[in-house]
């Protein structure tokens, strides 16, 4: 049974919220100097990429403003 579209959208939202919490208001140097934090952000971007590939073309076609 395929996952529901809303679950993929929740994955995207949750990953974005997590990225924001990992980065916060840290300076770039502080952020990239912490390998664990950097790795966590990269993993969340992978999650976003994988979830966006599951959004049907007819949905993305109706919302060209979202890339």
Image (spheres, grey):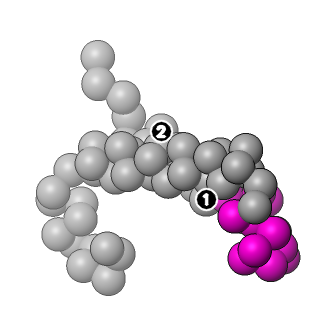
Q: Majority secondary structure of the magenta segment?
A: helix
Is residue 43 visible to the viewer in this orientation of the structure? yes
Q: Residue at label 2?
A: 7
Query: Which residue shows up at 73% across the image and 44% down it?
Result: 36
Query: Which residue shows up at 54% across the image and 51% down it?
Result: 42
Viewed as shown, does residue 16 lie left or right of 6?
Answer: right
- In front: label 2 or label 1: 1
Residue 34 magenta: no
**Location of residue 15 with respect to 16 vertically, above or below:** above
Q: Earlier in the sequence, mark 2 or mark 1?
A: 2
Pointer 2: residues within 10 angstroms few (<14), some, or many (20+)?
Answer: few
**Numbered tag placed on residue 33 in the rendering:** none
Q: Secondary structure at mark 2?
A: helix
Viewed as shown, does residue 35 lie left or right of 43?
Answer: right
Find the magenta span and give its range.
19-32
Q: Residue at label 1?
A: 16
The residue lying toward the viewer, choosing from 50 and 61, is 50
Pointer 1: residues within 10 angstroms few (<14), some, or many (20+)?
Answer: some
Query: Which residue shows up at 23% across the image and 65% down it?
Result: 60
Percent of width and height locating residue 45: 50, 54
Is residue 10 visible to the viewer in this orientation of the structure? no
């Amino acid at each position: 049974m395929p996952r529901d579209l809303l679950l993929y959208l929740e994955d995207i939202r949750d990953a974005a919220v997590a990225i924001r919490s990992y980065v916060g208001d840290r300076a770039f140097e502080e952020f990239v100097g912490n390998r664990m934090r950097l790795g966590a952000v990269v993993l969340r971007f992978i999650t976003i990429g994988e979830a966006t590939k599951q959004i049907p073309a007819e949905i993305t076609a109706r919302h060209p403003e979202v890339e």
